[in-house]
């Protein structure tokens, strides 16, 4: 008589993760992190390490000279960038640049994705100047990288782009339909449950994984700060706003992310989104703002007339 050995059922999340290829952390970043963690980091060593990677240094200088940093003069080389920004800020910029370079996959056009991410990073950087508790570099990094799991899932699932599009359309479209056609609100609700779900819940239902989950895994693999890793993991989880175990900085930067997304949406004439209806009021409470403060900020941002 033969017996079949007992095997534990495979976790659906583990199964979904199995085919997701997380890019390995580049040696340049590992060396940079090691140097920055030193009590006496070698500025020349850091400068040479970044400068020797031509593609990296060009990308870093392009960002340094962008409206996000708004420096008083153009920066011509990495040594000047260190002088203007300091080693810590350069480290953040190099990390963000290397992650963006690593998330390039054959057959995927991510220009629009990075355009949206860069704009969100810009708005969050500006917001950090008005909200105490989160520094500009952390705000910028969360704005740029909170959705870094999206390209990874696009690579894993051939139909993920359709899911991403659907979730975005429902995020904007369902609240709009309910406002424009109040009599149809009940019919809309009966027709689909998607409008009651957050972006990540739609992803999980269709693919067994969400972009916040895989994005946080990559962030940890690459040695990003705990605050940044947790913010990426929870940027669609609005229980973070009242979770006593959550780090206050994480709750605050997630709130800033939601406010920035809503501000960008309002700047184009949009109204509330499903994500805003889920967490907007709580997010405003975390940063001690009113909806009028948001409206005033949006007008100030529009007056800057920055193009990406």
Image (cartoon, rainbow, N blue to C red):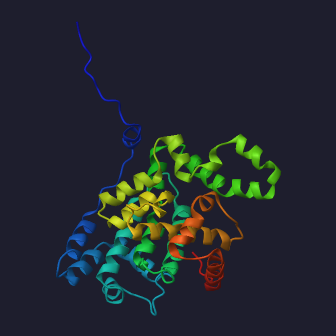
Q: Position of residue 19 (x, y in %)?
A: 38, 42
Q: In the rendered image, is residue 55 in sight?
A: yes
On screen, residue 243 versus residue 278, left or right, reads: left
On screen, residue 142 versus residue 79, left or right, reads: right
Q: Quadrant of the C terminus?
A: bottom right
> Which sits in the foreground, 241 or 14?
241
Answer above or below: position of 109 versus 248. Answer: above
Answer above or below: position of 129 versus 104. Answer: below
Q: Residue at x 35, y 80 (%)?
A: 89
Q: Residue at x 31, y 75 (%)?
A: 91
Q: Position of residue 148 (x, y in %)?
A: 44, 59
Q: Residue at x 24, y 66 (%)?
A: 30
Q: In the rendered image, is residue 148 in sight?
A: no
On screen, residue 254 versus residue 297, left or right, reads: left
Q: Quadrant of the N terminus?
A: top left
Q: Position of residue 156 (x, y in %)?
A: 45, 45
**Residue lying furthest bottom:** 72
């Amino acid at each position: 008589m033969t017996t079949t050995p007992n095997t534990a059922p495979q976790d659906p999340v583990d199964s979904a993760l199995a085919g997701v290829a997380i890019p390995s952390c580049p040696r340049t970043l590992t060396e940079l992190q090691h140097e920055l963690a030193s009590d006496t980091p070698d500025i020349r060593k850091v400068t040479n390490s970044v400068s020797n990677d031509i593609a990296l240094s060009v990308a870093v200088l392009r960002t340094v000279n962008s409206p996000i940093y708004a420096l008083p003069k153009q920066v011509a080389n990495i040594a000047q960038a260190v002088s203007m920004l300091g080693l810590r800020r350069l480290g953040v910029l190099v990390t963000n640049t290397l992650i963006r370079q690593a998330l390039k996959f054959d057959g995927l056009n991510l220009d629009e994705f990075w355009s949206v991410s860069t704009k969100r990073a810009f708005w969050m950087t500006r917001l950090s100047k008005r909200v105490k508790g989160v520094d500009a570099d952390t705000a910028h990094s969360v704005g740029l990288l909170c959705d870094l799991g999206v390209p990874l899932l696009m690579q894993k699932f051939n139909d993920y782009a359709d899911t991403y599009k659907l979730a975005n359309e429902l995020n904007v479209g369902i609240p709009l339909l309910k406002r424009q056609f109040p009599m149809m609100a009940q019919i809309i609700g009966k027709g689909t449950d998607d409008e009651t779900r957050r972006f990540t819940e739609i992803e999980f239902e269709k693919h067994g994984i969400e972009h916040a989950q895989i994005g946080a895994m990559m962030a940890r693999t690459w040695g990003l700060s705990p605050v940044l890793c947790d913010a990426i993991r929870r940027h669609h989880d609005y229980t973070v706003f009242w979770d006593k175990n959550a780090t206050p900085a994480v709750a605050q930067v997630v709130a800033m992310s939601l406010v920035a997304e809503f501000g960008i949406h309002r700047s184009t004439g949009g109204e509330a989104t499903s994500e805003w209806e889920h967490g907007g009021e709580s997010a405003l409470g975390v940063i001690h703002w009113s909806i009028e403060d948001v409206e005033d900020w949006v007008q100030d941002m529009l007056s800057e007339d920055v193009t990406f």
